[in-house]
Amino acid sequence: MLVLAAVVLVVTVGLAAASTVVLRTQLVTELDRELEQASQRLTQEPPQRPPGDEASGGEPSEEAPAPPAPVPAPDVDPDADTPSTFPPGVGPGSAVVRYFDGELVLADHLTSSLERLALDDDQVAELIAVPADGRPHVVQLRDLGTFRAVHRTTDDGQPSVVATNTETVDATVRRYVLVQVALGIAALLAAVVGGAWLVRRSLRPLDDVATAASRVSELELSRGAISAIPRVPEALTDERTEVGQVGAALNRMVENVEASLQARHASETQVRSFVADASHELRTPLASIRGYAELARRAPDDLLPTTARSLDRIESEAVRMTGLVEDLLLLARLDAGRPLDRSQVDLAALAVDAVMDAHAAGPDHTWTLDLSDDDADTAHSTGAMVEDELVVTGDESSLRQVLANLLANAHTHTPPGTHVDVRLVRDGDAVVLDVVDDGPGIPAALRPTLFHRFARGDTARNRNGGSTGLGLAIADAIVTAHGGTIAVSSTTADEHGSPGTRFTVRLPRDAR
């Protein structure tokens, strides 16, 4: 639209300027033609001798010459009060200077109202100063304005000057310019309004294409089964038009994306089914291994010391593998979308139990619990209960595992002496759980994948024990299944601020 308006403006200004120049040139040419004709008539007209200035025998007297008799001006209205003494063809707005025998016999200006005024000496001098070449010249007369004047010399060498005011030409050009400006503004407005309507009408189909693309961008395509992705309407896929080409290309892209996502989902479903089946099948042999190891250790006197140590290792590894299998089964159930148990869960009680268990498992860390009432904003010691403020609807065992995994993560990946603070607070219609430690922090490169399965922080934090890399992934899946969110913020020693990590879990009090 700006380009269109600029083009219309440039063309309009160019046409107006060119036509104005042509009009003024034409008017001035016509004025000059009339002025030259008047000047020729003035020089060809026989001059009149001043009355009383003739001696006997027809010779002019040299004593006290009288003003010459004015020449009649036939172009002047004979009924006017102004004496018709101007030469023929000299009309209103003109000035005439004429000499006879070296004497100034005529120096008058005829106004537009046919009033005859005498020219002063300076004005006469300005007119006489015009080059006597018989061609029009521009001269500025004091108090009278701009004139075009023609200076000729008669056959007897007497100067005569005819000048015409250019006020009429200037007024005509001004009116023409005003008309051109008005027409230009109207044309510019018409171009803007009409162009805007045309552009909007032409691009309106693109709004529908953009709407279809926006609907695709709002779909959840990162996980789960992929339903049919909206397409651009068939009416906007005619490839004979530019908009149709865009719509058809977008539909082809959507079809490709949909097929790829469906293939990905099918592959993930197969992998999850395999993991679930394999995990389920592993539970029995692992239970058998643990059982036989415990049975063998019931007769320690019959075992060699090396055998007893081997049985201990077998049992501990079986326990670890059993935990891994249980985690995989839980993730498989969550991926399958199986409904969770729904009941009133007191998060304060779960937090108390989790902190006590963490203190028993990691006495080398400092564990604190802060339960804050949203209204009173008071802190309670370990074991304190808040009646309804920290109660949510959800699966108690799953939420208990979320707390256990977060505290185990803080214990496993921070050095001894680290302070870990667990905070619970009511925030509107949600309960917010914060697990904050002052450990070394998590590097920025690891944070985006922290909740991915089998993500390991071995290179990021001090590792004191084994880790499956599933704890945070399980916590994220459980929280998401409850309609909540989990986030992490961390600072390392290389970044500004004190090192430390904060995990924030936000759970709705009434999850649907």
Image: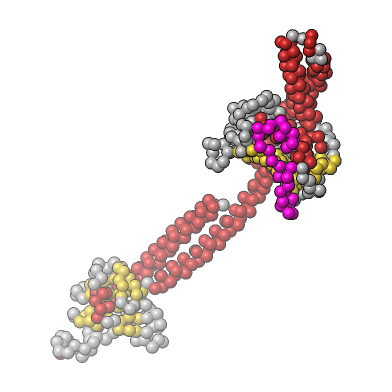
Name the residue nearer the viewer: 195 or 403: 403
431, 340: nearer the viewer: 431
Q: Position of residue 369 (x, y in %)?
A: 71, 42
Colour setting:
secondary structure
* Above/below status of 161 relative to 81: above
**Residue 104 in picture, x, y percent from top left:** 22, 81
In the image, is residue 259 part of the stretch drawn in magenta? no
Furthest toward the front, the residue is 301
Question: Can the viewer see residue 323?
Answer: yes
Which of the 4 image quarters holds residue 34? bottom left
- Residue depicted at x 46% and y 56%: 14
Location of residue 467 by image quarter: top right
Image mark count: 0
Residue ID at (82%, 37%) = 395
Magenta region, residue range = 354-382
| Residue ID at (63%, 27%) | 463
Q: Is residue 37 above or below residue 281?
A: below
Nearer the observer, 149 or 89? 149
Q: Is residue 41 visible?
A: no
Within the magenta stretch, is there residue 369?
yes
**In the image, 383: left or right of 462?**
right
Image quadrant where one finds the C terminus:
top right
Can you give x and y, in whole percent of width and height, for residue 193 in the image?
60, 57
Q: Quadrant of residue 75?
A: bottom left
The answer to whether residue 434 is above or below residue 309 is below
94 horizontally vs 50: left or right = right
Nearer to me, 259 or 403: 403
Q: Residue at x 81, y 48 (%)?
A: 387
User: Where does residue 509 sit, x and y in percent of width and height?
Assistant: 79, 46
